[in-house]
Each structure stands twice: as C-alpha cells, then as structure tokens.
Image (spheres, helix red, strand yellow):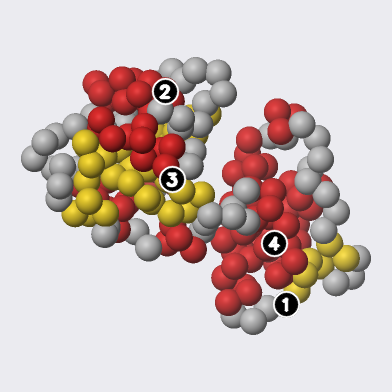
C-alpha cells in the first residue's frame, strides 16, 4: 500500500461508503458483489470502485467480484475499525447529547467513554448513560481509558482552547463540530464537520438542479 499521503482523500472517504454498503449487503445474506453493483449503489462506476480499492491491495476475483465478508474485514483493517476506539465527548449541549445517545457508534467501532463540559450546571447530569465530568478531569480520563479521539461540540469561541487542552491531555485525533477552524500540534490530526457549510453545499445543489423561474 502506498504512503497514506499519496492516496487521494476522496478515495479514503469512499472506503467508508463502500463499507456501509457492504455491511448492508452482508446483513441481507449477499456473499459476493461486483464492482459494478457496489458502485451503482453509490452512484459511482465500477471502474471508480476498482481504482479506489487498488490503492490498498487486490481484493477481487475475476468473474466473481468481491467476497463481501472478506472485503468488509479488509476495509475495517485499513480504516482501523477492526478494533474498538475509546472516544471522549467534549461539549454536552444539544448536539453533544444527541451524539452521546447515538447507538450506531459502537457497531462502527467507537465507544464514548467520557463526557465533559465546562458548564457547572451540566456537570453531574447524565447523557447517553455517562455522567458529565468537569474539564479538570479530562486528562486523567484520557489516560485511564487510553482514549485517543475527542469529539468537540463546543461553541466556536471555545474550540481552539478546548482542542489545545485535549491535545495536551493525550488526545491524538479530534472530530471538530465547532463552526471554527482549529490549529493542532504535530502528531494530532483533526477533521472538521461544519454543518452550516454542508447545508450550503446542499442548497447549492438544489438550486443548481431546480428549474429556472
């Protein structure tokens, strides 16, 4: 497999989409799938599927396609979800509470083991079966649980401070839902999910496909 930096981000992103569809096929009892069918489920060509997977190895069989169960295992290994990752959640407002209660994370290999907030009114309350802890306990919890990932659901003006604190406490991967960019030190990776930007992209697509007045 080439160095991760040489693999297009779009190809890595599509691995998660392939894994989702393959899991659905497996649940339906499908044993093999062609690149054409897998691509068709996602609005892609079979050639695109084959090109994406070739970055990571040779998984198909000529004339037979892909063994669904085997390919699921390979993609989980590549994505790192063949193990359970302990995650801490920082920010226990409405979004944080919704994420803490989401049951799908466990199936996908992620387990939220700690919830934190700087608001004393939220500390001690329960979300998703967890007791909200003060930020002062973050580093100890990260060390005790060997967590390496943090989900940030904090206001924009707090995002950088919280990200810096999380990194200092041992976090090595941050999923940032705050509508603000953050800087992370070397060795800490960050992915941002700006919901307003996603909605703007959606309205652009809707506007572009709408009939002119």
Q: Earlier in the sequence, mark 2 or mark 4?
A: 4
Image point 43% across, 45% down: which residue? 145
Residue 194, visible in the rendered structure: no
Q: Nearer the viewer, mark 2 or mark 1?
A: 2
Query: Which residue is disc 3 drawn over?
Result: 145
Above or below: residue 204 compared with residue 209: above
The alpha-carbon separation of the residues under discs 4 and 1 comes to: 13 Å
Is disc 1 placed on a helix, strand or loop?
Answer: loop
Is disc 3 placed on a helix, strand or loop?
Answer: helix
Is disc 4 placed on a helix, strand or loop?
Answer: helix
Is disc 2 placed on a helix, strand or loop?
Answer: helix
Q: Earlier in the sequence, mark 3 or mark 4?
A: 4
The percent coordinates of residue 39 (x first, y second) are: 68, 59
Q: Which mark is residue 168?
A: 2
In which quadrant is the C terminus drawn? top left
Q: Earlier in the sequence, mark 2 or mark 1?
A: 1
The alpha-carbon separation of the residues under discs 2 and 3 comes to: 16 Å
Q: Nearer the viewer, mark 2 or mark 3?
A: 3
Q: Do residues under tags 3 and 4 come within 8 Å of each other at their CB atoms?
A: no
In which quadrant is the N terminus drawn? top right
The alpha-carbon separation of the residues under discs 2 and 4 comes to: 34 Å
Query: Which residue is disc 4 drawn over?
Result: 73
Q: Quadrant of residue 73?
A: bottom right
Image point 40% across, 28% down: which residue? 169
Query: Which residue is disc 1 drawn over?
Result: 31
């Amino acid at each position: 497999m080439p160095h991760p930096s040489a693999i297009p981000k779009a190809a890595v992103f599509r691995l998660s989409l392939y894994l989702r569809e393959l899991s659905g096929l497996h649940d339906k009892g499908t044993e093999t799938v062609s690149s054409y069918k897998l691509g068709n489920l996602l609005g892609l060509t079979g050639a695109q599927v084959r090109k994406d997977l070739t970055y990571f190895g040779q998984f198909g069989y000529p004339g037979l396609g892909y063994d669904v169960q085997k390919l699921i295992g390979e993609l989980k290994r590549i994505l790192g979800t063949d193990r359970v990752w302990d995650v801490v959640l920082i920010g226990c407002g409405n979004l944080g509470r919704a994420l803490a209660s989401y049951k799908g994370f466990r199936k996908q290999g992620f387990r939220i083991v700690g919830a934190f907030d700087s608001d004393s009114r939220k500390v001690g309350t329960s979300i998703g079966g967890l007791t909200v802890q003060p930020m002062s306990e973050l580093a100890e919890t990260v060390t005790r649980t060997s967590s390496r990932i943090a989900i940030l659901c904090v206001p924009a003006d707090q995002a950088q401070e919280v990200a810096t604190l999380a990194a200092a406490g041992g976090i090595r991967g941050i999923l940032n839902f705050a509508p603000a960019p953050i800087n992370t030190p070397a060795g800490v990776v960050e992915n941002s999910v700006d919901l307003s930007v996603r909605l703007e992209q959606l309205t652009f697509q809707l506007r572009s496909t709408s009939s002119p007045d």
